[in-house]
Structures are given as C-alpha cells and as structure tokens.
C-alpha cells in the first residue's frame, strides 16, 4: 500500500483541495515538504462568522496545537501575510465571509485586488462595508471572473466603462446600493451574463425604480421585501427561460415584464393587484406557478 509521502505533490494538493482551508493549512506542520503545499490550493475560504469549536479539532495533539495558534492569530494577519504569497497561478474560487468582526474596508479591498491579479474565477464576498467601497478599479475589468456572489456590501463607484466580459453568474443578496444607478451600471458591464439573482434588503433602499435589460440572461430571480420604497421595475430579457419573482411589497407599484419570448418556466409570488398584469406579460411561458396574497 502506497504511503502519502510516496505520492507526487500535485496529487497531494488535489487531496488537500477537498478539505476546508483551515484544515489544509494545519497540514503545514507535518514536515518541510508539507509546509507550503496548501499554498497551491486553487480554492480558498476565509471566514470569521464563527469560531473554531471542539468538533473542528483532530485527535492529534500536534494538530490541536496548530489550531490553537491559528485561533490566536487574527484572520486579518493570516490573510495579509499569505494571500500575496499564494502560489497557485489561478485562484479558482475565493470565499470571504467576514460579517461578524472588524476588518477595515481598505484591507478587504486589497484582498480583492490580489485575487483579481491571480485571475480569480469565482469570488464570494459577504461583508458589511458600512458605506465604504471595497472594490478596486481593476475589479470591474476582471476578464477571468465567471461567478460573483456579493452579500451585504455597498455597491458604489461602479464605472460605466468597465467590462466583466466573462461573468455568467451574478448573485446579489441584501446589498446597499449607493445610488439609483448602481445596479444598472453593474448589469451594463456584464455582456454575457446568464444567471442573475437579486434580493433587495428594503431597509434604507436607494433603488426606487430599476430596469433589467440583459439580452443574454437565461435565469432571473428577484426578491422584493414588504418594506422600502420601490416605485416599480422593468424586465427586458429576450433570452430568459426561467423567472422567479417574489414581490412582497404591499404598496402599489408597476411591474413590467417585456420581451421574454423564450420564457419556459415562471414562479410568481406577488401581492394580488399585480397578478393579472404579470400573467398577460408572460404569455409564452410553458409552466407557471402562482402564489398570491
């Protein structure tokens, strides 16, 4: 039976890629050969949403010791030291779940910039940026980015001249939009976008009206809560095949769904006064589910 030490480095990195990042890092204490193997990982996940617990610890006393050292070293210090030195030529995915502790926006902005320089393909950021911009200018011209998931961040200073030319999946959850045009400008620089999900927060919402005009879009999910001040919206997506709308805003507002000739499946959960108009605008749909209050 082959021992781990007999396996080539690329296979060991493959094995490490199936482990959580924090566990993969802990293998660096095994030997000199293992010290930097984790730094070739193509997928990275850093989170401060919860602490290490007893169930995270392996049986080995040595590995428990490295976990203790990791706990005593702040996440910021660890990522600041290691992310610029990461050896993988391409970061396939980077997940930053940083909602519950104080990391300055300038620090996160630096991490995003590093990931862009490493041709990141999937980026997920959950962070309460408190009206601060966390995206460098290079982010909006990242040609490698295919999947982008953002939660709670402030979307501001979006350039109209940028180009996320490879972005196909965009998920925006409870963002703070700096102004009325932030969402529109972001969508306008995504020429091949196929999947879009937007969950509005409703609290302190700057977006009163919005228009989604994306010719390449195939799947769209919208959640509009029963708060805020939405005046209405327009959706124009000729390639759309799947549409999910949860419009719970009780006050009267307009909802125009136009130019969706390829729509095949729709799930509509809206207040009663919007139902008839919506149904008339999606006559091409083959499968329709309606929930109305």
Image (cartoon, grey):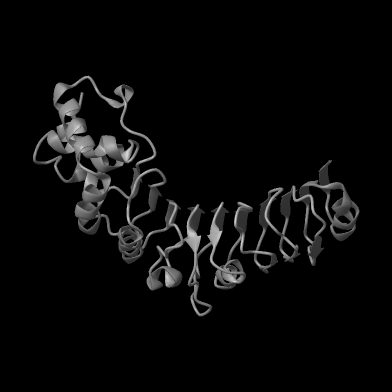
Rendered view: 181 above or below 33: below
Q: Is residue 191 visible?
A: no
Which residue is pictured at 41% across the width and 65% down the height? 135
Rendered view: 1 above or below 12: above
Rendered view: 171 above or below 236: above
Q: Residue furthest top?
A: 59
Image quadrant occupied by the N terminus: top left
Q: Residue furthest left?
A: 32
Q: Is residue 267 visible?
A: yes
- In the visual, does 63 lie left or right of 204? left
Image quadrant occupied by the C terminus: top right
- In the visual, does 107 lie left or right of 49? left
Of residues 239 and 273, the one nearer the viewer is 273
Which residue is pictured at 15% across the width and 22% down the height? 61
Of residues 204 and 273, the one nearer the viewer is 204
- In the visual, does 173 lie left or right of 71? right
Which residue is pictured at 11% across the width and 41% down the height? 33
Q: Residue furthest bottom?
A: 161
Residue 20, given in percent of the width and then of the height, sits at 33, 37
Q: Quadrant of residue 284?
A: bottom right
Which residue is pictured at 54% across the width and 66% down the height? 178
Residue 123, given in percent of the width and then of the height, sits at 43, 55
Residue 26, given in percent of the width and then of the height, sits at 21, 35
Q: Residue furthest front?
A: 204
Please state the total of marks drawn on the protein image: 0
- In the visual, does 118 lie left or right of 33? right
Residue 10, given in percent of the width and then of the height, sits at 24, 45
């Amino acid at each position: 039976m082959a021992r781990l030490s007999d396996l080539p480095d690329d296979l060991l990195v493959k094995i490490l890629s199936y482990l959580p990042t924090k566990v993969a890092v802990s293998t660096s204490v095994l030997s000199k050969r293992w010290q930097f193997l984790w730094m070739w990982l193509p997928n990275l996940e850093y989170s401060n949403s919860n602490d290490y617990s007893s169930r995270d610890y392996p049986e080995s006393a040595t590995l428990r010791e490295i976990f203790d050292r990791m706990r005593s070293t702040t996440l910021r210090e660890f990522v600041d030291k290691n992310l610029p030195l990461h050896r993988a030529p391409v970061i396939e995915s980077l997940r930053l779940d940083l909602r519950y502790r104080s990391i300055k926006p300038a620090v996160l902005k630096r991490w995003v910039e590093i990931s862009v320089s490493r041709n990141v393909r999937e980026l997920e950021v959950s962070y309460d940026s408190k009206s601060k911009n966390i995206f460098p200018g290079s982010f909006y011209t990242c040609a490698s980015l295919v999947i982008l998931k953002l939660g709670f961040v402030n979307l501001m200073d979006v350039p109209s001249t940028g180009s996320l030319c490879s972005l196909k999946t965009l998920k925006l959850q409870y963002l703070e939009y700096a102004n009325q045009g932030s969402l529109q400008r972001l969508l306008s620089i995504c020429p091949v976008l196929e999947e879009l999900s937007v969950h509005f927060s409703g609290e302190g919402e700057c977006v009163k009206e919005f228009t989604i005009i994306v010719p390449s879009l195939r799947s769209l999910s919208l959640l509009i809560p029963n708060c805020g001040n939405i005046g209405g919206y327009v959706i124009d997506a000729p390639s759309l095949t799947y549409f999910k709308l949860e419009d719970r805003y009780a006050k009267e507002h307009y909802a125009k769904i136009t130019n969706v000739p390829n729509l095949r499946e729709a799930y509509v959960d809206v207040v009663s006064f919007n139902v008839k108009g919506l149904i008339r605008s999606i006559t091409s749909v083959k499968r329709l589910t309606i929930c109305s209050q």
